[in-house]
């Protein structure tokens, strides 16, 4: 019997590559240390910060985060893989999240999803050829009173009709919030 | 915990995630039981309507539990169906077959068929480390392996990725499972998911015979089991020993025995006299040795006995007391000590007093045993260095030297040079070297797996070990020929010798044999 | 039913700039904490106990009692605010945080004072983006005004408050999953004991409370326990938010006492105002998906903590209703529900991990028109073989999976069977061949 197996002995990143986390990013991550009893607790904030910076969390970044938080890289991989919002692969600049839970589905969510797929010519977990969009479906976004919903990065779209989709996606500024944005995690204001 | 108590009482409670030396996660939900609790109204004890994990419930005075109720059995059955939902059922080609608790439990606690008609999830096989393969399809997600790398090794290589029924065991690419204790995860895995490449497809496990032994790899002296068949060793496995190694052993010990089967061992006795070489039969050896030693005694030749820390206590005692009987002035010398590296404590980075496992730099099993004998037997003793000087100064003219090391180059230049000065050199060793080449009487040794006896570990525990296999053709067990040389007849049994030693040396009345773990614990 | 219910938790919803500190203060905000600081923590806990404030996060556990489980001797106490709101189709916490973030912050201060908490972490689901920015801004204002930090309002009480954002995992709403997640780990719920009150976050005494639960506190403190218990039926006191969504005329979040019925919430003129196009209600999930489903004939159920059990449901849950109408294919509902739990099971416990996955596979096949009668039996049996109630799992997620799936299959069995009967012969085999 032959064994065809994925080889995990080889690094997937270039050991000589320069660090991807800039000193500023590291400093930002470190600024969270006082908030928690352990450095490890800063993992989720750190991943959010890095994903915002790089668009995804590369293996290289995982390793660097692990070193910064003094944990093993496998623990970072574990957490990245558990939470659906973190990606370990490059993806489109804007993430379109279409809600697929019950209220949205009842109100036409499936048609909205189809419209997004058709407009962008991608499937779920695909990135559009221009690198602009990445498409995922999500469980309930807690906006069911406005079903069906979708999000583009941080911005939520309410009562989306399949016919609205191409217009929304064509808008350059479709990921901009109408409210004042806080820094991802503000320092306590005292 | 109730589960442990039940297992110790001989009950066969199915369990996967529970392991006595790892943290309790109670996630496989296979060990569930029914328990009586006080009724909130009447206060009398009644069976609780829900099941509780026996691995997570501490034993309390007067508690009542049961495992034989329909609810408990139904849960076991249901669990086994679930475990097999995505399992490939490839037992005929699986290495674990025969010692697999998926096979075993589903046969005993499960139901005959799966009701799932859909395709099973197919997960990839992963090469997770230089020595280890992970066959994800067979994994039951007990997380024992992950907890081992977190809690015992402290190296954290293994981890869970993804969630739900897509969850898998994995490593960070490029940081493979490669710690000095990693072999234990294969033992811990209750199914055939983690596999030892070294053992892969070599032998069906039900053909293997097991022999209790002690690892000779370092002075920790882990209790181990030698798995062998028809005189061939296939693998070593740790045995539970609460005072020594718990359930673990290190890779150095686990894989370090391969030199035994290299094929260039010394196999027959040699006698050299005035440039001539003879190959005597084993039967004649006692006669030859006796003759030579009596001659030394007559001439009052100053003689040394160099005792190797690879010898069993019984063998060392046989040699020393035999020589001393003829030559009461004989000097006892502790032989070369193989020391390598520093002490390695686990979990990695923990201080010695908190360590849950330690690999020691002294790469031999019985320094303490040899020293104990030299001290207790009294009389003249010396060190190897001094001995070399004394030989050069002609203050020692004859020696009986024992080797038996895995290090073929253990003989230093100085020792080799000194040996050439000796009038008589009786040499016992595994492989040819400068000493064996210049010896007057050469007695091939057997390795520890081919012998029986006892070692004294670094903590002073006297631990007996048994013979698993025969030495290469032509060899004889050291114990046997030493026994005959010393004038005994019949079959050498270490235990018999130990009894004799105990008459003289009280220490040997107290040997440590690790208790067998409960039959159904794994 | 009192149609003249005066909104309490939602009194600032719709008020211009209610998220601003000044507006909140001008409308009587931050008076509850001022009054609370005049009381001792023990008095405060007693008051909350008297109010019998039951947790709004799903389990309905009395908050005052939960707090009194904290060990007497303790140096550090953590308060975790459960803003993970992931139960479809629940959005009341969002409404509260978006429209009136200071009310929540005041509730946190009061709970923090009562439990002598040193740090409060608001665990907010990753999907909450706009609410996050609003709440973070409010928190910054509150810090600047001295409501958080050292020696709050001149008292000896000091507490920090941070927002911790999740990243997409329903199970992190479970209190120990939440704690694990806060510690930077995968959100695998912990075995209990030890309970969080004894050893929770960083192994310190910890209290976890839902956003809506905390939002009740300023009002209980200001108006007293007697006022609170005067609202709603026995055992289900106080104002409650109800979310209604699905094909109704006016979906939204409504505040009422727990005397209200499902029917009123769907048809009441102050509530959802009936079904779009006057379609008949085929079914309703009245407490979030996890509590189970009601048929169109069971709409008189009262939305309090105890009535749902009489209808075969798990409990009140999040009191979020999703209604589906006569046009809905029940197989689609089943598929949607089974997928949710299969995707969100954390994967620790065998029965939950494999059971949810298997049920999803069966539902997929059923929805492709290739169901078998025995599939329905397997589904029901599987739901009985999972969950915390029969002791088969670590957390309550599989109970939440079992109830909707079991009630769907049982209450709509006839419809499922009709579909199976109408299937073309040989469809099952063909679908399996394509799938496998
Ligand atoms: C799978 C699962 C998901 C849960 N999700 C949430 C949630 O999103 N928000 C919440 O407040 N409680 C949730 N809970 C309930 C919490 O475990 C806990 O009971 C609650 O936060 C306690 O707060 P309360 O007493 O104020 O209701 C969930 C429970 C389970 C089992
Ligand atoms: S690989 Fe083996 S030990 Fe590890 S989780 Fe899977 S079954 Fe358990
Ligand atoms: S019951 Fe399910 S979700 Fe909860 S801990 Fe177990 S596997 Fe995870
Ligand atoms: S169901 Fe889509 S937002 Fe809730
Ligand atoms: S739950 Fe007890 S052994 Fe796994």
Image (cartoon, coloured by chain):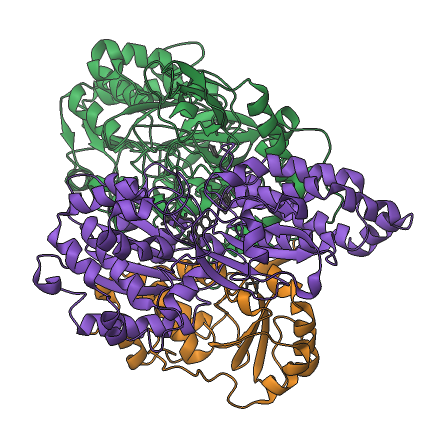
Chain colours: A orange, B green, C purple
Q: Nearer the viewer, residue B491 or B434?
A: B491
Image quadrant in which you'd find residue C122 = bottom left
- The answer to whether residue B211 is left or right of residue B437 is right
Q: Nearer the viewer, residue C242 or B223?
A: C242
Please report the residue visible at 27 percent of the width from the left and 41 percent of the height from the top: C49
Please report the residue visible at 91 percent of the width from the left and 51 percent of the height from the top: C424
- The answer to whether residue B270 is left or right of residue B310 is right
Whether residue C64 is visible, yes or no, is yes
Image coords of residue B43 (percent x, y): 36, 16
- The answer to whether residue C374 is left or right of residue C1 is right
Image coords of residue A150 (percent x, y): 56, 73
Q: Nearer the viewer, residue B301 or C16?
A: C16
Image coords of residue B31 (percent x, y): 50, 29
Whether residue C125 is visible, yes or no, is no
Vertical placement of residue C268 versus B136, above or below: below
Image coords of residue A119 (percent x, y): 68, 82
Image quadrant in which you'd find residue A157 = bottom right
């Amino acid at each position: 019997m032959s064994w065809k197996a994925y080889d995990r002995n080889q690094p997937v990143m270039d050991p000589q590559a320069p660090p991807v986390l800039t000193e500023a990013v590291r400093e930002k991550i470190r600024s969270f240390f006082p908030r928690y009893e352990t450095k490890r607790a800063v993992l989720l904030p750190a991943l959010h910060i890095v994903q915002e910076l790089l668009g995804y969390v590369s293996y290289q970044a995982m390793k660097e985060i692990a070193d910064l938080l003094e944990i093993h890289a496998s623990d970072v991989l574990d957490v990245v893989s558990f939470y659906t919002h973190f990606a370990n692969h490059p993806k489109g600049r804007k993430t379109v999240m279409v809600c697929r839970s019950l209220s949205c589905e009842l109100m036409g969510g499936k048609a909205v999803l189809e419209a997004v797929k058709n407009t962008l010519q991608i499937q779920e977990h695909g990135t559009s050829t221009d690198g602009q969009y990445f498409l995922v479906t999500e469980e309930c976004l807690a906006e069911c009173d406005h079903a069906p919903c979708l999000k583009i990065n941080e911005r939520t779209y309410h009562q989306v009709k399949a016919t609205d989709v191409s217009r929304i996606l064509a808008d350059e500024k479709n990921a901009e919030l109408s409210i004042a944005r806080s820094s991802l995690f503000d320092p306590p204001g005292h | 915990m109730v589960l442990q108590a039940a297992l110790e009482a001989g009950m066969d409670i199915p369990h996967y995630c529970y392991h006595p030396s790892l943290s309790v996660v109670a996630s496989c939900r296979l060990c569930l039981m029914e328990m009586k609790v006080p009724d909130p109204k009447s206060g009398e004890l009644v069976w609780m309507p829900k099941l509780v994990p026996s691995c997570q419930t501490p034993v309390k005075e007067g508690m009542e539990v049961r495992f034989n109720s329909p609810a408990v059995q139904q849960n076991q059955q249901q669990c086994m169906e679930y475990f097999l939902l995505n399992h490939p059922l490839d037992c005929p080609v699986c290495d674990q077959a025969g010692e697999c608790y998926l096979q075993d439990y589903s046969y005993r606690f499960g139901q005959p068929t799966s009701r799932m008609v859909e395709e099973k999830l197919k997960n990839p096989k992963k090469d997770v480390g230089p020595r280890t393969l992970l066959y994800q399809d067979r994994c039951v997600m007990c997380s024992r392996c992950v907890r081992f790398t977190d809690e015992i090794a402290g190296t954290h290589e293994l981890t869970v990725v993804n969630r739900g029924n897509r969850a898998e065991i994995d490593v960070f690419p490029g940081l493979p499972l490669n710690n000095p204790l990693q072999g234990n995860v294969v033992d811990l895995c209750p199914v055939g998911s983690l596999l030892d490449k070294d053992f892969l497809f070599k032998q069906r496990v039900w053909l293997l015979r097991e022999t209790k032994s002690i690892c000779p790899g370092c002075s920790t002296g882990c209790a181990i089991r030698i798995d062998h068949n028809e005189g061939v060793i296939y693998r070593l496995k740790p045995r539970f020993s609460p005072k020594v190694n718990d359930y673990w052993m290190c890779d150095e010990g686990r894989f370090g025995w391969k030199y035994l089967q290299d094929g260039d061992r010394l196999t027959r006795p040699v006698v050299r006299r005035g440039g001539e070489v003879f190959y005597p039969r084993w039967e004649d050896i006692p006669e030859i040795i006796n003759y030579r030693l009596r001659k030394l005694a007559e001439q009052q030749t100053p003689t040394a006995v160099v005792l190797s820390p690879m010898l069993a206590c019984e063998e060392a005692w046989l040699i020393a007391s035999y020589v001393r009987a003829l030559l009461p002035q004989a000097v006892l010398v502790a032989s070369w000590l193989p020391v390598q590296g520093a002490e390695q404590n686990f979990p990695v980075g923990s201080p010695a007093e908190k360590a849950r496992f330690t690999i020691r730099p002294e790469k031999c099993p019985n320094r303490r045993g040899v020293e104990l004998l030299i001290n207790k037997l009294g009389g003249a003793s010396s060190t190897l260095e001094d001995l070399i000087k004394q030989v050069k100064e002609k203050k020692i003219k004859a020696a009986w030297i024992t080797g038996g090391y895995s290090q073929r180059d253990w003989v230093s230049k100085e020792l080799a040079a000194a040996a050439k000065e000796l009038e008589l050199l009786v040499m016992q060793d595994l492989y040819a070297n400068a000493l064996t080449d210049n010896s007057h009487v050469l007695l091939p040794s057997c390795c520890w797996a081919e012998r029986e006896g006892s070692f004294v570990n670094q903590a002073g525990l006297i631990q007996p070990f048994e013979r698993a296999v025969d030495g290469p053709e032509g060899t004889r067990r050291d114990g046997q020929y030493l026994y005959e040389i010393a004038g005994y007849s019949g079959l050498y049994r270490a235990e018999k010798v130990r009894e004799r030693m105990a008459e003289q040396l009280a220490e040997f009345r107290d040997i440590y044999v690790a208790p067998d773990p409960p039959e159904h614990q794994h | 039913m009192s149609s003249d219910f005066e909104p309490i938790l939602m009194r600032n919803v719709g008020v211009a700039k209610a998220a601003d500190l000044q507006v909140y203060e001008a409308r009587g905000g931050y008076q509850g904490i001022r009054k609370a600081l005049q009381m001792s923590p023990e008095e405060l806990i007693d008051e909350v106990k008297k109010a019998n404030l039951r947790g709004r996060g799903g389990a309905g556990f009395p908050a005052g009692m939960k707090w009194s489980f904290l060990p007497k001797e303790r140096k550090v106490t953590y308060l975790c605010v459960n803003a993970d709101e992931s139960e479809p189709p629940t959005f009341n916490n969002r409404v509260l945080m978006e429209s009136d973030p200071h009310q929540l912050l005041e509730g946190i201060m009061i709970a923090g004072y009562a439990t002598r908490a040193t740090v409060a972490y608001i665990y907010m689901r990753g999907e909450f983006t706009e609410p996050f920015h609003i709440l973070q801004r409010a928190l910054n204002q509150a810090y600047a005004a001295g409501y958080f930090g050292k020696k709050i309002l001149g008292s000896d009480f000091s507490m920090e408050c941070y927002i911790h954002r999740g990243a997409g995992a329903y199970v992190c709403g479970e209190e120990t999953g939440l704690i694990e997640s806060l510690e930077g780990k995968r959100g695998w719920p912990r075995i209990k004991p030890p309970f969080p009150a004894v050893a929770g976050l960083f192994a310190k005494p910890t209290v976890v409370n839902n956003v809506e639960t905390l939002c009740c506190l300023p009002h209980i403190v200001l108006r007293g326990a007697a006022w609170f218990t005067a609202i709603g039926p026995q055992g289900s006191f106080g104002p409650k938010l109800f979310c209604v969504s699905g094909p109704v005329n006016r979906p939204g979040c409504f505040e009422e006492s727990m005397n209200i019925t499902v029917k009123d919430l769907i048809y009441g003129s102050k509530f959802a105002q009936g079904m779009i196009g006057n379609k008949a209600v085929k079914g309703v999930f009245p407490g979030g998906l996890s509590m189970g489903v009601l048929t169109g004939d069971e709409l008189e159920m009262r939305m309090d903590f105890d009535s749902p059990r009489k209808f075969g449901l798990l409990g009140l849950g999040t009191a979020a209703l999703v209604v589906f109408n006569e046009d809905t294919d029940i197989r689609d509902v089943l598929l949607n529900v089974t997928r949710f739990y299969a995707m969100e099971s954390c994967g620790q416990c065998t029965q939950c991990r494999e059971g949810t996955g298997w049920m999803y596979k069966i539902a997929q096949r059923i929805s492709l028109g290739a169901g078998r009668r025995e599939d329905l039996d397997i589904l029901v049996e599987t739901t009985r073989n999972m969950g915390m109630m029969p002791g088969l799992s670590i957390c309550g997620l599989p109970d939440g999976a079992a109830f909707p799936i079991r009630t769907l299959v049982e209450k709509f069995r006839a419809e499922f069977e009709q579909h199976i009967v109408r299937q073309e012969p040989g469809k099952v085999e063909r679908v399996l061949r394509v799938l496998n």
